[in-house]
Image: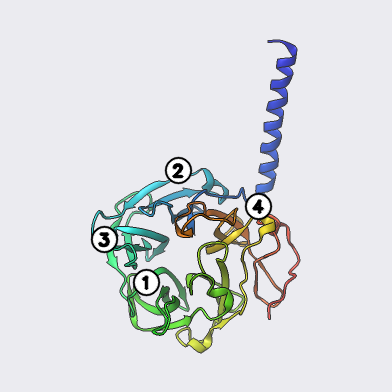
Amino acid sequence: MNLIKLLRITLAVALVTSQFTVTAQRLKKNEFNNPLVLQRADPDVWKASDGTYYFVATVPEYDRIELRHSKTINGIRDAQPVVIWRKHTKGPMGNHIWAPELHKIDGKWYIYFAAGGAEDKWKIRKYALSNESDDPLKGEWREVGPILSKPDEFSLDATTFVHKGQRFMIWVDRASKKVVNTGLYIAKMTSPTTLDDKQVVISRPEFPWEIMGHKVNEAPAVLIRKGKVFVTFSASATDANYGIGLLWADKDSDLLDTASWHKLPQPVFYTNAALKRFGPGHNSFTVAEDGKTDIMIYHARDYKDIKGEPLYDPNRNTRARVLRWTRDGMPDFGQEYDDNEMALKKRKRVKKK
């Protein structure tokens, strides 16, 4: 080996080592190697009591549910997916497998997801799987069946949370008899897969930003902080018009009273062409490895123009970013900043009115 070739090899090794060192330093600041997962929409992350992160999302083929796990959020990028369930070949749960969410309830794992029929892919309903294993990537996932609600016309995007000892579910269904739309419903849960009879609408698409392409409120995600129950949701078509809105209720209010809920008239997180962030939406929340920094997991594309129906464009990629808080106790989504810039912000700048 001649001297020039040896110098080239040495330089290449040094460059790789340098890049690794920079990456390692970046990870200490709650920065993320985005996109975290390619071609995974509707991402959901559950942080277990031992610190393990479990990741589940919609696959572009809409035909299966995968799980992966990691000790760090950035590690999800290289974690190997494990297929835990596949769609049916006929009947219900046979098409459009969407938006799985993983939850551990009373020592048992549950996945809530939406699915259409094999013969009618738009007959969307919400379903549940369960697993009694300590490790959700092991054991047997059983089909629990549909989660029934009223109405039951186009039901999807179920999420669950506990507040003051009571478990609630928020989900999506038709919310008007006059126009075709979807809105957010809430109810108490009588078990991990059944709902109380009182089921009320807490949000319908009403503002201009919510009705671009389709009249949609969907993808609720809950975060209880600062004396409030916050609910993010997504609206409009799944192209560059898609964005995230915000609802909230006081923690001591009646969550089943529509009047308890307040909604901002403008989106809190939406397309920013300068940052190549198009149609961000369908987020979930978790906390960083430090156990205290709030993290938003969401999907977005890095381009605007789509050929054909946006729903079948596969390139909605999972991303992660720090969620900051304003002085008056409202979440600051950092619309004008890229994902890793949010990790560096120390000052609570934006006040929401």
Frontmost residue, 98 versus 109? 98
Tell me which label, 4 or 3, sits earlier in the chain. 4
Q: For mark 3, give the secondary structure.
A: loop
Q: Alpha-carbon distance for marks 4 and 2?
A: 22 Å
Q: Position of residue 21 (x, y in %)?
A: 69, 38
Q: Residue furthest front?
A: 308
User: Where does residue 15 sit, x and y in percent of width and height?
Assistant: 71, 31
Which residue is at the far left?
A: 90
Query: Residue at 51% across / 51% down in the picture?
Result: 315
Nearer to us: label 4 or label 3: 3
Give amino acid for label 2: Gln
Q: Earlier in the sequence, mark 1 or mark 3?
A: 3
Q: Amino acid at mark 1?
A: Ser
- Residue 108 visible (yes or no): no
For label 4, the crowd category at 10 Å Cα-Cα, with few meaning under 14, some 14 to 19 and many 20 or more, is many
Quadrant of residue 319 within the rendered picture: bottom right
Q: Which residue is mark 2?
A: 80
Camera-side mark, 2 or 1: 1
| Left or right of residue 185: residue 77 | right
* Residue designated by label 4: 31
In this view, 320 is above or below 162: above
For numbered disc 4, what is the local secondary structure?
loop
Residue identifier under label 3: 119
Badge 3 crowding class, 10 Å Cα cut-off, few under 14, some 14 to 19, many 20 or more, is few
